[in-house]
Amino acid sequence: MSSPLPVTGPAAARLLRADYTVLVTDPQLTVLGDPLHEWSRLQATLRWKEPGSGQIVLPAHNYIRDQLMPGCRIVVIRHVLGRSSVLLAGPMEQRLRERADDGEHGGVGTLTVSFADDTAHLAARVAYPDPTKLPKNQTSDYWTYSGNPEQGMLTLVDTQAGPGALAARRVPKLQVAPFSGIAGTGTIALGPTSDVAPRERLERLTDVLRRMCTLGVGTGHPDSLGFRVRQTQINGADTLLFEPVRSRNLAGDVHFSFAMGNLRYYSFELGAPTLTHPIVGGQGEGVDRFIDEFPTTDPAQLAWGRWEGYVARAGASPRAQLQAAATEALQEAGQSGRLASSAADTVDQRFGVHYSVGDLVSLELDIGETVSAPVQTVSLQAWPTAGEVVGTTIGDQSARYESAWIREMRLMDQRVGTLERYALTAV
């Protein structure tokens, strides 16, 4: 006899109770028709500093098809443990209608609707060098900024997609949050070239925002400064609010481990540097050219061997400028480490109640060996009568280059290896 559950095996054991309300709105956030009650399967993936995505399967009734027209938005509200919040909301991207003479697509057929969250509006805009001018009237190649990173993000979105943008580029109902000081008092400089990676012309707003988060993170975890667009109400009116956000440090409260049954996998990747001995060239030609070598002094980097490379810094002449260029290059090309893991919700630790995307949580790699890392993605699968299964990806969005952090991870490996050898000897 087949299982009454929509999933079987380990996934079935992770089914947890949750209820969902699915609405359709127009671009102005006005609800169209009644809630969609007849859905049979819902999937949603939320991402840190990237657009989320969702998919829902529905019967292809006429009244549902009439609501799901180009330009509409899908709003998914999640109800769990007495709390209700918008899980994912944003524009419909694809609608697939299927009908067959029997089986899953029999009767009126099915609709599979794919949609994104409202951060996708920012990925759909590029950064005009001068946001007040049309492309044909631009006089420079890049949007540039110097100042506080949070203010830079607010200015970028306001002038490229928000109320301060050209009328045709404004995202309906989009507002930017007031300055909060969440990024601290540090400053960043985003010029024609970047101290993170070479810049492209007309970058997508989400790419520029992520770069400013990296440059302006300040103290704490290097992936802790982010941004989001969420549907909320301001003075009673439905609004899409763009806001820079800082990860909450929940490492002391939210734990994932094999012993607790909510950690399923982890990996730590260590990579060799591609540069240990940068040769920096400044201004001048021939014998008059400023050029010198600035090798790293970090023993952990040098243990990989000698890696030479040329770093061009035209216009730089004082030795301090050449040294700064070398330091920057070594940071970008040094040894790298990347932590990734897969976890799941449990009855007493639920997404949206105890933690959210971007939060720093605790990850136990082995007995007594714990690190903190951000929640990068949360993927949910839900069924109307059975509940939901939640999977969480915890780790680093990209490789990390801080020698102190990498040394800590390597020391953990060494300590765990020593404990394992002692255990084998004792046996």
Image (cartoon, rainbow, N blue to C red):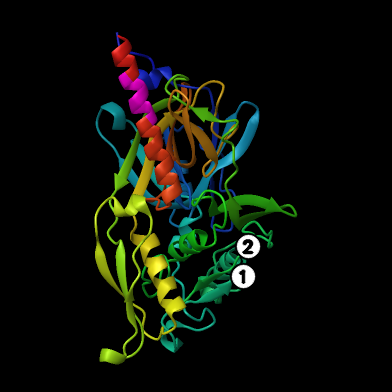
Res 147 → quadrant:
bottom right
Which residue lies most toward the right here?
Answer: 235
Residue 168 is situated, as x and y percent measured from the top left of the image, at 51, 74
Residue type beneath disc 1:
Pro
Q: Residues within 10 Å of mark 2 (few under 14, many from 20)?
A: many
Q: Is residue 153 visible in the rendered structure shown here?
A: yes
Element under disc 1: loop
Element under disc 2: strand
Left or right of 390 on screen, residue 172: right
* Residue 421: mark: none
Residue 46 is situated, as x and y percent measured from the top left of the image, at 47, 43
Question: Is 219 rendered above or below residue 81?
Answer: below
Which residue in the structure is indicated by mark 1? Answer: 163
Question: Is 306 rendered above or below residue 85?
Answer: below
Name the residue: 39% across, 46% down: 114
Name the residue: 25% across, 90% down: 286
Residue 248 is situated, as x and y percent measured from the top left of the image, at 60, 43
- CB within 8 Å, label 1 to label 2: yes
In magenta stretch: residue 338: no
In magenta stretch: residue 416: yes
The foreground one among 376 and 118 is 376
The foreground one among 354 and 219 is 219
Name the residue: 38% across, 41% down: 339
**Residue stretch in magenta:** 415-421
Q: Residues within 10 Å of mark 1 (few under 14, many from 20)?
A: some
Q: CA distance from mark 1 to mark 2?
A: 8 Å
Quadrant in which the C terminus appears:
top left
* Residue 176: mark: 2
Res 192 → quadrant:
bottom left
Residue type beneath disc 2:
Val
